[in-house]
Amino acid sequence: MGYVAVKGGTKAIEESIKRLKYERLKQKRVLQTEDIEAGMRGLIDQVMSESSLYSETLAALAIKQAEGNPEEAVFLLRAYRSTLPRKHYSRTALTENMRVERRISASFKDIPGGQILGATTDYSHRLLDFGLMEESEADIEEWLSAYGAEPSADEELDKLPKVVDYLRKEGLMKPFPLNDEEPDDVTRRSLEFPSSRSERLQILSRGQTGTLTSLGYAVIRGYGSLHPTVGELRVGGVPIYTDHPTDGGSEEDAYYIGDVTVTEAEMLIPVTVEKEHGKKEIEFEIGYGICYGQNETKAIAMGILDNSLETKHPQYPTQDEEFVLYHIDSVESTGFISHLKMPHYVTFQSKLDSMRKTKAGRKEKEE
């Protein structure tokens, strides 16, 4: 369910909306959507991921309209997304074909193709840079000129092997048959329990970043039974292809329509399995996370929760799919909490009347 503002005095509502616009404009400065798109990459990636709509321009517009409030921006984009027709489906996007911008493994020091640090705050000092307060476009031009051009397109960064493939070859990961079933679509059919893995992955991918991070942290702290390691973390552009609208099906009829930047995390979870004659061995299970843009914490937490929900141990709330999936949605949770601000006069007055009658009855008995 989704909650939005309902009834109220028309004049009061109109004045409230005017006041909202005034608060955005009172400093007489116009924040251009191009500036948001150029300088707020992390926020844009978060909003696109949680709204399930990949458009940096529309995300920038939603952020401007929401005055930087990511929850409101996601609400705006989700609402807009619901009005769009679905004209085509792309072919299955293969992350093996990702043009990698960043790629690391916390499990292995040396991986085929090498570790690629890319753009990350992981190695920064996390100190405020007061020089940014005086930064000018001339400063930017000078820095960019000194930095040099973009990496060459000839670099072999679009066919890097997957780390988990080497574990599979060694027999250290449980084999799974290929599942070619059409995934369920949570945007077109209400979620039911028990849910399918495709439903869980969709909801996790568009879940609220902070909530996923908190629940993933809870799993590791002891409110779950996992001890994961990042097998491989990738950030880069995944090519998207669509079939010819009338003659689709053959390889020649596939149209390349662009790249989508995603973060992909494959988490390795060691488990003890019992073999023949009671012999026990350690194998690795995998938890998978993927989301729009560069949002590594979310992708890692998603991978943790993916495996946690597969386990379904009743002892832990983080392995209860209803608990997790119903509470990580940004629009659902924000809407429900926000609806408490709406009028509840009738229900509250009935509670007051009940309390007064109880107190009055108790007083009569005492007398």
Image (cartoon, grey):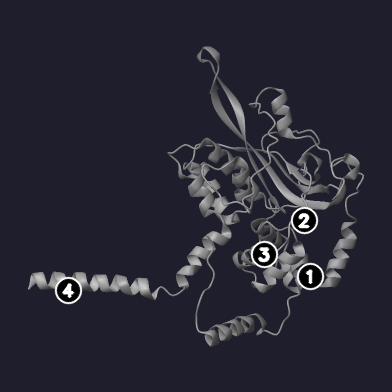
Q: CA distance from mark 1 to mark 4?
A: 64 Å
Residue 348's place in the image compared with 227, above or below, is: below
Residue 306's place in the image compared with 365, above or below, is: above
What amino acid does circle 2 point to?
Lys
Lower sequence index among marks 3 and 4? 3
Lower sequence index among marks 2 and 3? 3
Q: CA distance from mark 3 to mark 1?
A: 17 Å
Circle 3: is it few (<14), some (14-19), or many (20+) Cα within 10 Å?
many
Residue 154: % across, % down: 92, 44
Q: Which residue is mark 3?
A: 77
Q: Which residue is mark 2?
A: 87
Q: Quadrant of residue 201?
A: top right
Tag 2 secondary structure: loop
Q: Which residue is mark 4?
A: 360
Toward the viewer: 234 or 312? Answer: 312
Please tell me which residue is depicted at 61% across the width and 32% down the height of the picture.
285
Foreground mark, 1 or 4, reads 4
Lower sequence index among marks 1 and 4? 1
Residue 238's place in the image compared with 287, above or below, is: below
Residue 172: % across, % down: 65, 24
Please tell me which residue is depicted at 73% across the width and 33% down the height of the picture.
163
Foreground mark, 2 or 1, reads 2
Res 34 label: 1
Q: Is residue 352 left or right of residue 139?
A: left
Toward the viewer: 185 or 233? Answer: 185
What amino acid does circle 3 point to?
Leu
Q: Quadrant of residue 165?
A: top right
